[in-house]
Amino acid sequence: MLRYLPNVTTLEYDSEKCSGCGMCLQVCPHAVFALENKRARVIDRDACMECGACAINCPEGALTVRAGVGCAQAVLAGARRGTEPICDCSEDSSCCN
């Protein structure tokens, strides 16, 4: 599985709001969540690609993420090419702020 930069995801989870519906497990493309004791649990935060599917589909609002940030991917791609991040992470861009 593709790994992103460690400890940079904007994913936040409030277990108190979780109803255990499992929607986050169904929509997450990178298996970031597991269901334990009738509640979701984040099991692989660094696999999160910040697509926002979990937050959009959580009926309880237990998940938040700055969907579309994608800066980890852009930083890695820029590093491979020897260039700046390819998401226009300039100071006047909202991409990485």
Image (cartoon, rainbow, N blue to C red):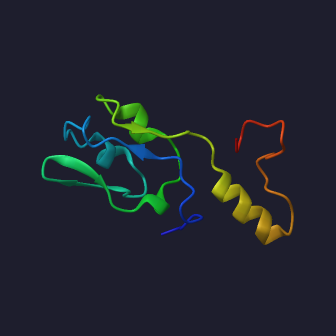
Residue pictured at 48% horizontal, 62% vertical? 46
Residue pictured at 70% horizontal, 45% vertical? 96
Residue 73: which quarter of the image? Answer: bottom right
Where is residue 94? Give x, y as percent.
Answer: 73, 36
Farthest residue in the left direction? Answer: 37
Where is residue 5? Give x, y as percent.
Answer: 60, 64
Residue pictured at 78% horizontal, 68% vertical? 79
Residue pictured at 33% horizontal, 44% vertical? 24
Residue 31: which quarter of the image? Answer: bottom left
Q: Is residue 5 left or right of residue 33?
A: right
State the quadrant of the C terminus.
top right
Farthest residue in the right direction? Answer: 83
Where is residue 15? Give x, y as percent.
Answer: 27, 43
Instruction: Name above or below for residue 75 compared with residue 19.
Output: below
Q: Is residue 88 left or right of residue 18?
A: right
Residue 91: which quarter of the image? Answer: top right
Where is residue 59? Give x, y as percent.
Answer: 30, 28
